[in-house]
Amino acid sequence: MDLLGIHKPLIGVVHLLPLPGAPRYGGSMKRVIDRAMADATAYRKGGMDGLLIENYGDTPFHAGRLPPDTIAAMTAVGIGLRGLGAFPLGINALRSDGLAALAIATAIDAQFIRVNVLAGAMMTDQGLIQGCAACLMRSRATLRARVEIWGDLLVKHAVPLAPQDPIDAATDLIQRAHADALILTGHRTGAPVAVEMLTQVRGAVPRSAVVIGSGIATGNLDQTWSLADGFIVGTSLKKGSRTQSPVDPARVERLVEWRKHLAGDRRRRQVQ
């Protein structure tokens, strides 16, 4: 299954520095934009297929709606990145403001958004976060926005209020919340996905898009290659594997080359 018109796309995360209104904002939007542009350029020159913008530096995150200053700042960054060319671009409005993400995506011509809690309810370090699928899907219809909505399955840095079967949750995200793709993660940023869980989810929703949302690196891409339709990668491509650090172009190039090798193996097997 092709995702965003690309076979198994690699999507680099642009972790934004703290934005206006955040406790650690440095007082310069130029610095925020310059860093985002530098990371985005390193991803694109290295061969990554798309980008995902996150207000990662805005800790502590809001559990509900984002304030106008954050939405405005993310839109400003998004306009700059959109100017780099035509490629898949996504928005994740942390912690889980799907309506803000959709509004930004519509304004900057982004192709998808990531929503950490699209359905159900999760207990997080921000408190209780509840799903927003009902209002989000209706808002997309009203806006006539051609934006895909990707929902996290039992998202990282969170636990369900009661034990929940991942297969049931995956099925509900597709059939009842109308997610265009499912995102699977490890337990926290940079942590790998459990291959056993990925295998179970893949079997439960064989015709739906499944994306790996954390823990992907050159050393383990092959473990999930055949099971996933796309890969969101950030921490392992940063200098020193530190999420807050700039993108390391050499790491990007190695991951892209390994993807080419895996894709080549697939084509050779098909010919045989």
Image (cartoon, rainbow, N blue to C red):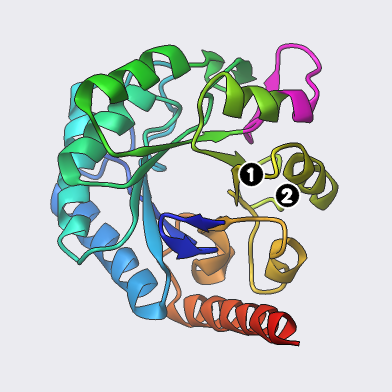
Q: Amino acid at mark 2?
A: Val
State the SS at label 2. loop
Q: Horizontally, is 268 left or right of 70 in the view?
A: right
Q: Position of residue 91 (x, y in %)?
A: 35, 42
140 and 233: which is toward the camera: 140
Q: Main secondary structure of the magenta part?
A: loop
- Image quarter for residue 184? top right
Residue 164 is covered by the magenta coloring: yes
Secondary structure beneath label 1: loop
Among the two numbered marks 1 and 2 on one chain, the one whose residue lies closer to the N terminus: 2
Q: Nearer the viewer, residue 133 or 254?
A: 133
The image shows residue 11, relative to residue 123, as above or below, that is below
Residue shown at 74% from the left, 82% from the top: 269
| Image mark for residue 51 | none
Task: State the image coordinates of residue 87 (x, y, percent, origin top left).
Answer: 30, 62
Residue density around tag 2, few if under 14, some if 14–19, many if 20 or more, within 10 Å: some
Identify residue type, mark 1: Arg
Which label sits on residue 193? 2
Residue at the farthest right position: 196
Where is the N terminus found, in terms of image quarters? bottom right
Label tally: 2
In this rendered view, identify the residue nearer to me: 72 or 149: 149
Quarter the C terminus occupies: bottom right
Considering every residue shown, the one lying at the far front of the view is: 271
- Identify the residue at horizontal 32%, vertical 32% (top origin): 101
Q: Position of residue 226 (x, y in %)?
A: 72, 63
Which residue position holds label 1? Answer: 207
Residue range (magenta): 153-168
